[in-house]
């Protein structure tokens, strides 16, 4: 049976993978919107591209926070194991 901390760590890893995919998609959106806005002289397409850029920044921040949390959980688990060792 999986412990709660292992389950949480698996959820965090899955969340990071989903966020990487999301960032890749938003990067594609940004590039297409930026290129299209330059070709069509459209401010609305430029605004859509800038919105995608903000989403990329937000996604990157989320990945950073999830990785920090994952590292913290890993270090806490190691500390607990060390404290349980009889040696």
Image (cartoon, rainbow, N blue to C red):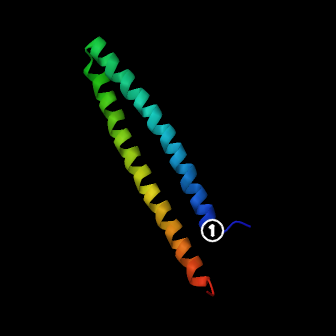
**Whole-percent x and y of residue 82?**
57, 79
Which one is in front, 7 or 84? 84
Which one is in front, 27 or 33? 27
What number of labels is visible? 1
**In screen coordinates, is 56 left or right of 80?**
left
Is the N terminus in the top left, top right, bottom left or bottom right quadrant? Answer: bottom right
Which one is in front, 77 or 4? 77
**Whole-percent x and y of residue 16?**
51, 49
**Whole-percent x and y of residue 55?**
37, 40
Asked which quadrant contains residue 8, the reply is bottom right
**In screen coordinates, is 29 left or right of 39?**
right
In this rendering, the answer to whether 12 lies above or below 1 is above
Q: What element carries label 1?
A: helix
In this rendering, the answer to whether 49 lies above or below 80 is above
Q: Name the residue carrying label 1.
A: 4
Residue occupying the far right of the picture? 1
Query: Residue drawn 52% across and 76% down?
Result: 79
Residue occupying the far front of the picture? 87
Query: Residue drawn 50% across and 60% down?
Result: 70
Asked which quadrant contains residue 33, the reply is top left
Asked which quadrant contains residue 17, the reply is top right
Residue occupying the far top of the picture? 39
Is the C terminus in the top left, top right, bottom left or bottom right quadrant? Answer: bottom right
């Amino acid at each position: 049976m999986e412990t709660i901390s292992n389950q949480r760590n698996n959820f965090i890893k899955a969340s990071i993978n989903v966020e990487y995919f999301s960032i890749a998609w938003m990067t594609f959106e940004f590039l297409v919107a930026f290129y299209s806005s330059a070709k069509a002289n459209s401010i609305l397409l430029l605004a859509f591209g800038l919105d995608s850029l903000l989403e990329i920044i937000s996604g990157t921040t989320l990945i950073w926070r999830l990785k920090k949390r994952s590292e913290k959980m890993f270090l806490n688990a190691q500390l607990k194991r060390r404290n349980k060792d009889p040696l």
